[in-house]
Amino acid sequence: MNGLGGLLVRLDRHCCCGGKIAVIVEGAELAALHCQECRQFRQWIEPEVFRFLVELIATFGRPTEPITVFEEVNRLVT
């Protein structure tokens, strides 16, 4: 695949079990994040984030620490 499988990702929201670290699980065309603690599906990786991580690893090598990914929140501020 693209070398992302097993990469650890720190999310800004807790899983229902309380875990904040997820593991990338690669599929045929998509990659998903599963909780490291309970293995529950957390979310799909956005295509832009997937491409960025592939390029990051190709350029700098595989990270040894979890990568922090923040959930984008769109809010209307008045």
Image (tube, rainbow, N blue to C red):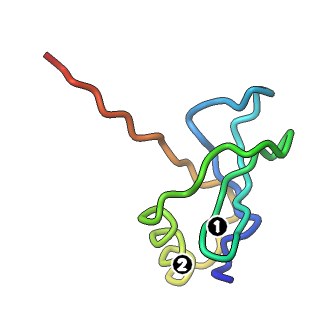
The image shows residue 65 at horizontal and vertical percentages of 68, 57
* Residue under pointer 1: 63
Q: Is residue 13 above or below residue 24?
A: above
Left-right relation of 32 to 53: right
Left-right relation of 31 to 70: right
Q: Secondary structure at mark 1?
A: loop
Q: Residue at x 61, y 79 (%)?
A: 61
* Residue under pointer 2: 60
Left-right relation of 35 to 78: right
The image shows residue 75 at horizontal and vertical percentages of 28, 27
Q: Are marks 1 and 2 in contact (CB under 8 Å)?
A: yes
Q: Residue at x 64, y 67 (%)?
A: 63
Query: In 3D space, how far apart are the residues under numbered discs 1 and 2 (Cα atoms)?
Result: 8 Å
Q: Residue at x 40, y 40 (%)?
A: 72
The image shows residue 39 at horizontal and vertical percentages of 83, 46
Left-right relation of 71 to 11: left
